[in-house]
Image (cartoon, grey):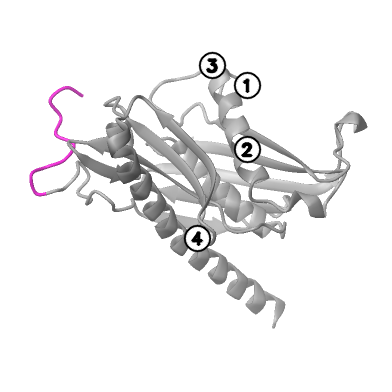
Amino acid sequence: MAGLELLSDQGYRVDGRRAGELRKIQARMGVFAQADGSAYIEQGNTKALAVVYGPHEIRGSRARALPDRALVNCQYSSATFSTGERKRRPHGDRKSCEMGLQLRQTFEAAILTQLHPRSQIDIYVQVLQADGGTYAACVNAATLAVLDAGIPMRDFVCACSAGFVDGTALADLSHVEEATGGPQLALALLPASGQIALLEMDARLHEDHLEQVLEAAARASRDVHTVLDRVVRQHVQEASVLLGD
């Protein structure tokens, strides 16, 4: 990526976006009838699918059951064709386990788990195509799938990435922007309260710039919420028409 200009003098990025502009988001809910909840999302060229089962009885050892809340189980995988690099193990590797843990931490902060003690909620997310912002796409797809399953949440949980290039904070990084190796921040936000469900930083960033990058990610996450809210409302309207209400 040497010599690639990520931000032009006019303030445009490689793909023509402004610094704080999101990639185009398209999403659908209820894509799998067999699951309790499901959703598909495209953020730019990153595509993710999420399915949710539960709440249901604990599977396996009942010793895992939590007496005061539901157990949230999250599993992440990526299709072997999701990137240009062919992988032998699309799931179960270290990166997949780390992503699954991040997703679990994110949704434990958003789902009202205390309403379903001694039960289990399973969230499965698969990336079909990776082109930057993988964690954010997974969170946003899973949020729609959890809502489709009718599982109570404190709020939407919306995620977006941000980076810092030439003194400017960039929101919703593409693969090209991530590949430069600059500082990257991933944020999962509950927009109504402003509560942060997860915050992760890759590479070093001077503390003087942290607030600027964090604000760019938060603002972009609120923009994501606007899109997801519209998708949910449209889905509810379509379901009402099918039910004849």
Residue at label 2?
105
The residue that appears at 39% across and 36% down in the rendered structure is: 185
For mark 4, does the 10 Å Cα neighbourhood hold few (<14), some (14 to 19), or many (20 or more) residues?
Answer: many
Which of the two marks, 1 or 4, is nearer to us in this view? 4
Residue 141: percent from the left, percent from the top?
A: 55, 49
Mark 3 or mark 2: which is in front?
Answer: 2
Extreme-bottom residue of the structure = 245
Location of mark 1 (residue): 92
Question: Would residue 32 be visible to someone looking at this image?
Answer: no
Q: Look at mark 4 in the image and give the residue it sits on.
A: 228
* Magenta range: 1-10
- Say which mark, if any, is on residue 88: 3
User: Answer yes or no: do the residues labelled 1 and 4 have beta carbons within 8 Å?
Assistant: no
Query: For the residue marked with disc 1, what is the amino acid?
Result: Gly
12 to the left or right of 38:
left
Q: Earlier in the sequence, mark 3 or mark 4?
A: 3
> Which amino acid type corresponds to the residue marked 2 in the rendered image?
Gln
Q: CA distance from mark 1 to mark 4?
A: 29 Å
Residue 150 figure quarter = bottom right
Element type at marker 2?
helix
Residues packed near mark 3 inside 10 Å, few (<14), some (14 to 19) or many (20 plus): few
Q: CA distance from mark 2 to mark 1?
A: 18 Å
Q: Position of residue 82 (x, y in %)?
A: 45, 31
Split into 4 quadrants, where in the image is the C terminus?
Answer: bottom right
Q: Residues within 10 Å of mark 1 (few under 14, many from 20)?
A: few
Mark 2 vs mark 1, foreground winner is: 2
What is the distance, in whole Å, between disc 3 and disc 4 at their CAs?
Answer: 34 Å
Asked if residue 178 lies left or right of residue 17, the reply is: right
Q: Considering the numbered disc 3 on the image, is that residue within a helix, a strand or a loop?
A: loop
Specify whether 60 is left or right of 204.
Answer: right
